[in-house]
Image (cartoon, rainbow, N blue to C red):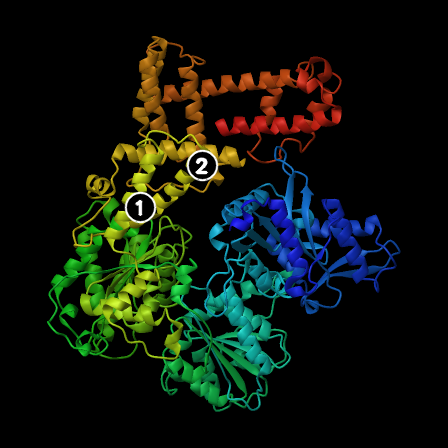
């Protein structure tokens, strides 16, 4: 790192550019060193466009003709629409132009068939000057921009060593907020934050969707370790053709309604897709056995995107006629089809319907497989495909079909059960190729069916990359289990046990869930799933209903705000077995209870719709925002169900191997790392044996070698390896010890939790320590017991919790409100950003809220002390007021109240009579009066400073600002602001203050506009 300590960013920037021009010693990107302005960028693009379309135009484009091109590009309003424009139709992006000579032509901008060849031009530019787009903001200068055919596609923001990529990401977020990625920069697809030893890339995005968690490191293909050297990153990612491919072939256009965005694939997704495509290209559909191999990517790592890109790109290969995506459950067909259609870049562009289709029935499936059509990607269920090939009328298909199989670990057997349908399909369609995708392969069955593993991305690697969360797992003792159980005794797929029949067990489980609900749910922010299963081949639904009834019984004893909204879900049965009547009666009872809870009207004829509605209330996508706290299931929702705001799984059954990974993984989707540090899992039977099964499963599915060899380790070794990999949480004592060290350091930095440190270096350290404080506290709050099984609770034993981490309640309030608030204000000012963009949201041991009655009393007390000239007493009250105000999480409210209190303290505001009012309404009126007086003074000062005395009244300015919104350019739509400036043109040099009077007319207009928007923002923020 010492090589870079003394280098300026400009030197590092030039080093990067030089390297990009000669990656691998081969000429790559051309450095266009004379392009420094936006206008020069447009001219460069125009030259390339003319050069690539010489057959369609005579010579040069006129200003009028090129104006039509500029209009199309400038009108692009989102990265998603930019992606659609760049993809165009069948990979060719064109712009329609009416030439001056009357001809009508289509000019080619991009042709994806010409990657690294043909007419494609690759250039790199730097230090492009960007004039401000939003009034009141500064002009900008971009570091490095990579152009393809003259259009900006990749933007790199560089920082020297000893700086972080977070600073670069913050900078790019600021550019998005300031609308700098507009005009010719509206085509940007990829943003890169680069330091010499850390490089992260992400898809361009709208401001409201900007998320640093989606900025990824690149990885080595063989071991998934992050690439740390910028030169290695350049070799692997920024070389031609890879950079072009990443911005096009490996970019996904997500057209999900109201959530349109672009997604750039992660390294492991790119590697897997490349390997499958390479296999398909070389495959002989007439002679080979069809086993291309399988992709093992852990649950939650984005297999849908990977499989879609594979299907999309494979469907364009010359030796593939159709791609069929097989879903393992009928219920998932619509979900997958919807996702595929949303990712289809053709769908919705210029009225096109896309190339992805689902199948309504077997006849529809037959038609789509046998008829020529541009809709050559078909999504269907394995059940429907199996019924299709089993029909007497089925005839051999002549098309070359690539089958992509979802949840490939379930595709085993002989064809007589659901799991064996794949083999029957393969026999019926021998000239087909097969590739499987799974998060939990069966060893060695999956390999035997699909062939060798093509690419692996394990749960250990996904957790290290922060693509999914680790787990905090508890094994609870309820009733005493039988001693020395055999493996069959604990396997509830084989034998029943005492856990299946004990009513005491049910009572203790439900009691534990209620007692620790706040801790595990993060005070109700997250919800939970509860899976129940009994052994001995008996029906599990009666036990699920027993739990449902027990929850209802306990809920009835609690006040409404402490009740849990509980539902149960299982399938109706038509099997005519001995369980049928009771199962259906129980389901009907559960549905009636659900209807009462949510005001719905489901019944036994709408069980499917009931289940779908229940799932929406569990994954928090219900339109009425009325959600469930807990859902009891037997097997439903344990695979394929995605709910980022669910964080806990309760388990009253035995889970093993892949089934355990699948079930646990319902809880570990990324959401908010501070509020959801991991997925919680609580096991209620066979604690010793189930802990061993869990550690075996995690160890197997976190090691790539499991695909080839059997792993046999002791529990201690397994557990240690899983904790080191971050799969399992640390012991409570370890996290508590880390927290105590952080609290001690925070005390030293803040003079024992009193004040912000004076030096910038110490403030930077404080910022990082506060983030660590947040991370550890969010973890500690979700433990329910310490290492010795003693109960722990930040909610039930707050004082004990404070003592454990070494801080008092008063110190915690000052640290997390006053000091953290002041630090955010300093960083916002230093980085020239809005305070809302400072990434520091504090976690509290318990909710910190303003006591408004107490605050009003304090303000009135201080006002009386100031009025009586007791300034020492007023100073003490003033400090107490600021501590109380700091508890607000509303920055605008805090600013308004602080300004009011400051004016009282400095005697700039006085009440009409004393003692000052302690009534909330009267105090609010006084605050509004103070704000109005301040605004009038600001208007008056502005008029005088800018020489408006003879042309504009303060009230005119007030009326114009009333309709303003912070950060928006909205006060000159009908030339209102321009008129004010023009009316002052001949007066300002005579009556404005000296520094303004000295400005030229052009400079006056520029500075006046900036100052006016600054004034408007200041006033609006104070309202």
- Pointer 2 local density, CA inside 10 Å: few below 14, some 14–19, many at least 20: few
Q: Is residue 606 left or right of residue 740?
A: right
Q: Which residue is mark 2?
A: 761
Q: Is residue 495 left or right of residue 347?
A: left
Q: Secondary structure at mark 1?
A: helix
The image position of residue 308, as x and y in percent, is: 53, 69
Q: Secondary structure at mark 2?
A: helix
Mark 1 touching mark 2, by CB under 8 A?
no
- Identify the residue at image location x=54%, y=90%: 396
- Pointer 1 local density, CA inside 10 Å: few below 14, some 14–19, many at least 20: many
The image position of residue 760, as x and y in percent, is: 46, 34
Q: Which residue is mark 1?
A: 777
Q: What count of labels does the image hold?
A: 2
* Residue situated in front as seen by the camera: 215 or 252: 215
> Which quadrant of the structure image shows residue 138?
top right
The answer to whether one can see residue 605 in this image is: no
């Amino acid at each position: 790192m010492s090589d870079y300590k003394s280098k300026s960013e400009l030197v590092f920037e030039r080093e990067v550019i030089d390297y990009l021009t000669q990656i691998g010693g081969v000429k790559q990107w051309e450095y266009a060193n004379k392009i420094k302005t936006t206008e020069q960028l447009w001219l460069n693009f125009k030259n390339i466009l003319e050069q690539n379309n010489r057959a369609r135009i005579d010579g040069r484009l006129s200003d009028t003709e090129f104006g039509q091109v500029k209009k199309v590009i400038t009108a692009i309003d989102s990265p998603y629409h930019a992606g659609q424009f760049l993809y165009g139709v069948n990979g060719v992006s064109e712009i329609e132009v009416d030439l001056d000579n009357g001809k009508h032509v289509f000019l080619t901008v991009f042709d994806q068939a010409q990657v690294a060849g043909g007419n494609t031009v690759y250039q790199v530019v730097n230090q492009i000057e960007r004039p401000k787009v939003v009034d009141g903001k500064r002009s900008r200068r971009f570091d490095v921009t990579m152009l393809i055919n003259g259009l900006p596609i990749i933007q790199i923001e560089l920082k020297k060593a000893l700086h972080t990529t977070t600073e670069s990401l913050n900078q790019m977020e600021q550019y998005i907020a300031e609308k700098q990625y507009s005009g010719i920069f509206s085509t940007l697809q990829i943003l890169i934050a680069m330091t010499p030893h850390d490089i992260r890339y992400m898809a361009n995005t709208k401001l409201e969707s900007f998320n640093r968690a989606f900025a990824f490191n690149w990885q080595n293909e063989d071991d998934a370790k992050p690439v740390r050297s910028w030169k290695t990153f350049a070799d692997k990612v920024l070389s031609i053709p890879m950079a072009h491919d990443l911005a096009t072939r490996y970019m996904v256009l997500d057209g999900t309604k109201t959530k349109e965005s672009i997604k750039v694939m992660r390294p492991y997704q790119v590697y897997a897709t490349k390997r499958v495509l390479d296999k398909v290209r070389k495959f002989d559909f007439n002679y080979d056995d069809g086993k291309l191999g399988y992709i093992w990517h852990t649950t939650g790592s984005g297999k849908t995107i990977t499989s879609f890109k594979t299907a999309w790109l494979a469907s364009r290969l010359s030796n593939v006629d159709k791609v069929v995506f097989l879903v393992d459950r009928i219920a998932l067909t619509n979900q997958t089809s919807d996702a595929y259609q949303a990712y289809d870049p053709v769908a919705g562009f210029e009225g096109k319907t896309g190339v992805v289709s689902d199948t309504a029935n077997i006849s529809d499936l037959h038609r789509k497989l046998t008829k020529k059509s541009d809709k050559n990607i078909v999504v269907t269920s394995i059940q429907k495909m199996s019924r299709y090939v089993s029909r007497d009328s089925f005839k051999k298909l002549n098309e070359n079909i690539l089958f992509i199989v979802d949840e490939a670990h379930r595709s085993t057997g002989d064809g007589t059960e659901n799991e064996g349908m794949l083999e029957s399909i393969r026999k019926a369609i021998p000239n087909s190729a097969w590739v499987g995708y799974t998060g939990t392969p069966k060893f060695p069955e999956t390999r035997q069916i699909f062939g060798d593993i093509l690419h692996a991305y394990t749960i250990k690697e996904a957790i290290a990359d922060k693509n999914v969360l680790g787990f905090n797992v508890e094994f609870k003792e309820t009733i005493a289990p039988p001693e020395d159980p055999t493996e069959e005794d604990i396997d509830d797929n084989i034998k029943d046990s005492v856990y299946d029949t004990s009513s005491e067990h049910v009572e203790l489980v439900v009691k534990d869930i209620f007692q620790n609900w706040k801790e595990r749910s993060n005070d109700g922010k997250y919800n939970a799933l509860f899976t129940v299963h009994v052994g001995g081949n008996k029906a599990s639904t009666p036990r699920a209903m027993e739990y449902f009834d027990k929850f209802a019984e306990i809920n009835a004893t609690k006040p409404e705000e402490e009740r849990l909204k509980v539902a149960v879900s299982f399938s109706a049965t038509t099997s005519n077995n001995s369980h049928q009547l009771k199962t259906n009666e129980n389901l009907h009872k559960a549905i009636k209870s659900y209807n009462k809870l949510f005001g719905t009207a489901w019944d036994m004829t709408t069980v499917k719709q009931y289940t779908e509605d229940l799932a929406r209330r569990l994954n928090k996508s219900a339109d009425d925002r009325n959600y469930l706290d807990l859902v009891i299931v037997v097997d439903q929702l344990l695979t394929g169900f995605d709910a980022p705001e669910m964080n806990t799984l309760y388990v009253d059954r035995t889970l093993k191997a892949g089934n355990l990974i699948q079930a646990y993984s319902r809880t570990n989707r990324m959401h908010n790392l501070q509020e959801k540090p991991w997925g919680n899992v609580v096991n209620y039977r066979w604690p010793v044996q189930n802990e061993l099964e869990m550690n075996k499963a995690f160890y197997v599915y976190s090691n790539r070698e499991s695909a080839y060899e059997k792993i046999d380790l002791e529990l201690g070794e397994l557990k240690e390896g899983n904790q080191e990999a971050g799969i399992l949480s640390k012991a409570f004592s370890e996290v508590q010890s880390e927290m105590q060290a952080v609290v001690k350091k925070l005390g030293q930095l803040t003079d024992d939790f009193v004040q912000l440190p004076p030096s910038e270096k110490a403030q930077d350290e404080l910022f990082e320590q506060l983030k660590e404080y947040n991370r550890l506290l969010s973890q500690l709050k979700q433990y329910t017991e310490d290492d010795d099984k003693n109960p722990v609770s930040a909610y039930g034993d707050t004082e004990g919790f404070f003592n454990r981490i070494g801080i008092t309640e008063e110190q915690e309030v000052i640290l997390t409100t006053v000091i953290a608030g002041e630090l955010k204000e300093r960083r916002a000012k230093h980085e020239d950003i809005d305070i809302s963009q400072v990434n520091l949201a504090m976690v509290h041991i318990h909710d910190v809220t303003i006591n408004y009655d107490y605050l009003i009393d304090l303000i009135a007390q201080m006002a009386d002390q100031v009025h009586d000239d007791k300034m020492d007493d007023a100073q003490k009250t003033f400090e107490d007021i600021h501590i109380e105000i700091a508890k607000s999480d509303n920055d605008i409210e805090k600013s308004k109240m602080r300004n009011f209190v400051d004016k009282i303290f400095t005697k700039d505001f006085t009440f009409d009579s004393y003692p000052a009012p302690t009534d909330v309404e009267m105090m609010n009126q006084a605050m509004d009066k103070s704000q109005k007086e301040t605004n009038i003074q600001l208007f008056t000062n502005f008029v005088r400073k800018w020489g408006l005395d003879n042309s504009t009244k303060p009230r005119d300015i007030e009326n114009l600002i009333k309709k303003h919104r912070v950060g928006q350019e909205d006060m000159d739509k009908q030339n209102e602001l321009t008129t004010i400036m023009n009316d002052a043109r001949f007066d300002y040099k005579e009556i404005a203050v000296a520094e303004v009077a000295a400005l030229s007319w052009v400079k006056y207009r520029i500075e006046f506009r900036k100052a006016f928007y600054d004034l408007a923002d200041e006033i609006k923020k104070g309202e």
